[in-house]
Image (cartoon, helix red, strand yellow):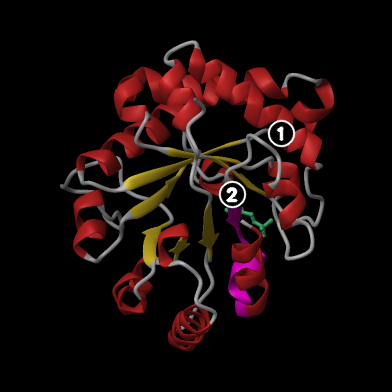
Amino acid sequence: MAIQRKPLVAGNWKLNGSDSLVEEMSSALQKAEISSSDVVICVPAPYLAKFQSSGFDIGAQDVSEHDAGAYTGEVSAEMLAECGAKWVIVGHSERRTYHAESDSQVAQKAAMAIKAGLTPIVCFGEEEEIRDNGTYTDHCIAQLAAVIDVLGIENFAQCVLAYEPVWAIGTGKTASPEQAQDMHKSVRDFIATHSADVAEGMRILYGGSVKADNASELFSQPDVDGGLIGGASLKAEDFIQICRSA
Ligand code: 13P
């Protein structure tokens, strides 16, 4: 019998936020009676402790690949856990692009997160030229294969994945539900070459210009298990509507 995967909506505030947004968002989510087990908000690290009282799961947006030591500016997975984080995004395309993070660094970050008891949300996705030249499936599978190589399939099973086509992030150009489903299915089939059970249970979120008016159609695809939401996670009303769509 097929496993029922629980949908998840994760907000990614990126470099946005303030004390007042933390307050506004936690009270709006509570009032809307959104089930806290289905929502994660990934905030800038200084807001982790403040958001913790909301009762919603909170996550960080990056983590050091190191445990400790002379790495100025880095924050370790253990530290994030001590601040109340339960989740952490790794391998977001903005980290890969602006901070030159490699697949193996992303894999190491995921390993650190798991060791500290955090759930990594492992992002993967292709740039527009890769979409246009048709090699997007191979590109995405290579990004994930690097993570499986480091974690092993048993630890990989503890991750949540997020397909974020780079051309759809912050552009208003959403992948069509068919494009998202097609990629999610290919990724699930690839994971099944390692373990059919892990593939079946793996939650694969879609991210890239998800809005209140397109979320339902994207989330209704059989292999799309929720979303990773950027811009729309900063507006309580929109984010709540997206949570309801899942
Ligand atoms: P947008 O929803 O703003 O396109 O951002 C997507 C994203 O990068 C979430 O991590």
Residue at the farthest top position: 193
Mark 2 = which residue? 226
Q: Answer left or right for 126 relative to 188.
A: right
Q: Answer left or right for 66 relative to 214.
A: left
Residue at the farthest left position: 69
Which residue type does callout 2 highlight? Gly
Q: Inspect the magenta stretch and tell me whether residue 83 lies in it.
A: no
Vertical arrangement, residue 222 with respect to residue 119, above or below: above
Which residue type does callout 1 highlight? Gln
- Front one among 70 and 221: 221
Mark 1 = which residue? 181
Q: Which residues are magenta?
A: 226-236
Q: Earlier in the sequence, mark 2 or mark 1?
A: 1
| Residue at x 65%, y 17% (from the top left corner) | 138
Check the picture and name the quadrant holding the C terminus.
bottom right
Vertical arrangement, residue 154 with respect to residue 72, above or below: above
Some atom of ligand 1 lies within 8 Å of the CB belonging to the residue at label 2: no
Q: Position of residue 51 (x, y in %)?
A: 36, 76
Mark 1 Cα-neighbour bin, 10 Å: few <14, some 14–19, many ≥20: many
- Front one among 175 and 218: 218
Q: Position of residue 5 (x, y in %)?
A: 49, 40
Vertical arrangement, residue 61 with respect to residue 35, above or below: above
Q: Answer left or right for 26 relative to 130.
A: left
Task: Count the labels in the image.
Answer: 2
| Residue at x 61%, y 58% (from the top left corner) | 229
Disc number for residue 159: none
| Residue at x 41%, y 60% (from the top left corner) | 37
Q: Quadrant of residue 172?
A: bottom right
Mark 2 Cα-neighbour bin, 10 Å: few <14, some 14–19, many ≥20: many
| Alpha carbons under labels 2 and 1: distance apart | 12 Å
- Front one among 23 and 246: 246
